[in-house]
């Protein structure tokens, strides 16, 4: 007799941790750090809103409560995406 699989698969993306310096995303089986210096949109956001992240497609991250969209590629390679935010850092 075989056991049924337990639970459902976990989210493809989740915020793993938040610090005064940035946030960690668990994404595609890796953990990646997003420093507020490079992602200033998140710096003054309420922590509860940071944790509500969605992945509408494989290449797109969205924080609906903050109206922030990011390309997944920009998370792994921010050096390829010059900062365009007008937010104060």
Image: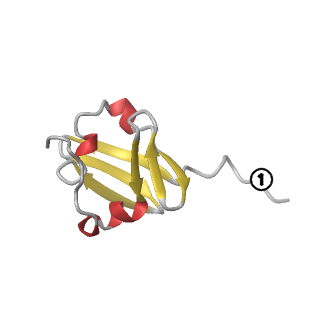
Classify the position of the C terminus by image quarter.
Answer: top left
Task: Classify residue 34 as left or right of residue 58.
Answer: left
Q: Which of these two is toward me, 56 or 17?
A: 56
Q: Which of these two is toward me, 34 or 17?
A: 34
Q: Position of residue 55 (x, y in %)?
A: 52, 51
* Res 26 quadrant in image: bottom left
Colour treatment of the image: secondary structure
- Residue occupying image coordinates x 39% and y 65%: 73
- Residue occupying image coordinates x 25% and y 50%: 39
Q: Position of residue 22 (x, y in %)?
A: 23, 47
Residue neighbourhood size for the residue with mark 1, other residues' Cα within 10 Å, grouped as few (<14), some (14–19), many (≥20): few
Report the residue that reaches farthest toward the right: 1
Q: Position of residue 12 (x, y in %)?
A: 53, 54
Whether residue 10 is situated above or below residue 18 in the rendered picture: below
Q: Find disc 1 in the rendering and name its residue.
A: 4
Classify the position of the N terminus by image quarter.
Answer: bottom right
Task: Classify residue 27 as left or right of residue 86.
Answer: right
Q: Which of these two is toward me, 77 or 11?
A: 77
SS type, badge 1: loop
Report the residue that reaches farthest toward the left: 89
- Residue occupying image coordinates x 44% and y 58%: 27
- Residue occupying image coordinates x 14% and y 40%: 88
Q: Position of residue 57 (x, y in %)?
A: 55, 57
The tally of labels here is: 1
């Amino acid at each position: 007799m075989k056991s049924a699989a337990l639970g459902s698969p976990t989210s493809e993306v989740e915020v793993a941790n938040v610090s005064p310096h940035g946030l960690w995303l668990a994404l595609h089986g890796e953990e990646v750090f997003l420093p507020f210096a490079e992602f200033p949109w998140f710096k003054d956001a309420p922590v509860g809103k940071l944790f509500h992240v969605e992945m509408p497609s494989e290449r797109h991250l969205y924080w609906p409560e903050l109206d922030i969209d990011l390309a997944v590629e920009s998370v792994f390679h921010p050096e390829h995406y010059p900062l365009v935010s007008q937010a104060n850092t």
